[in-house]
Amino acid sequence: LIGDADLSNQPPTITSAATSSSSESEVDAVDGSTWIIERGSSANLSVGASDEGGSSALKFTWNVVGPAPVYINPNGSNLSSTTSVEFEQSGDYIATVTVTDESGLAASSSCNLRVLQTSSALVVSPAAAVLSVGQSQNFTATLNDQFGSAMASQPASVEWTAAGGGLIDASGNFTASAAGGP
């Protein structure tokens, strides 16, 4: 005997799984999971859902967990099936969306996001030096990613050139040979 239960109300249906706008993915060799590859500092996320009460009554709650905090952009008071997320560092993240209907019934969908380091800047250190003629200064170069962090894999070599004021060798050691040069 079922009683007065409303059998017509069912949880929302996920019609298209949570995903990112990135078209690149890879399969993990160890566990076979699929990871969507992100090479920037943000991603656009989306999910498709329907409900017998109509999709306009659905509430979408996004959550992203990973090695660093993320910022999930407001998406119309959580009424949107799309949103964007901003990352603070590279790593593996799991994005989950919970879709809730007016009765509080829910369904969820998740996607795996692998944020890879992408080179974005070459930083020379020190940025400037004041030398007397005959003095030397060693410079270093670091390739940074989209978050301003040093890339895990640095170039094997850097080609150094000086536009004036002295000479720089292959290891980045600059020797001032003229006064007033850059």
Image (cartoon, grey):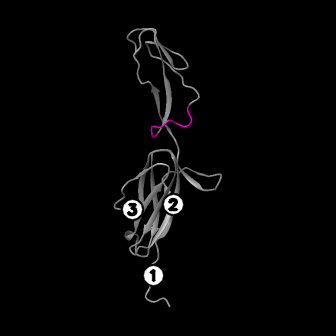
Q: Which residue is drawn at 50% across and 91% down?
A: 1
Q: Does the magenta-highlighted stretch encompass residue 162? A: no
Which is more toward the observer, 72 or 15? 72
Under circle 3, the secondary element is: loop
Q: Name the residue under label 3.
A: 80
Q: Mark 1 points at which residue?
A: 8
Under circle 1, the secondary element is: loop
Q: Does the magenta-highlighted stretch encompass residue 152? A: yes
Of all residues, the one furthest to the bottom in this rendering is: 1
Q: Name the residue under label 2.
A: 110
Q: Which residue is drawn at 45% across and 16% down?
A: 163
Tell me the quarter of the image containing the C terminus. top left
Horizontal and vertical percent for residue 3? Answer: 45, 89
Horizontal and vertical percent for residue 99? Answer: 44, 67
Mark 3 or mark 2, earlier in chain = 3
Mark 1 or mark 3, earlier in chain = 1
- Residue bounds of the magenta highlight: 146-154
**Amino acid type for the residue under numbered disc 1:** Ser
182 to 68, vertically: above or below: above
**Amino acid type for the residue under numbered disc 2:** Ser
**Amino acid type for the residue under numbered disc 3:** Ser
94 to 12, vertically: above or below: above
Residue 9 shows up from this direction: yes
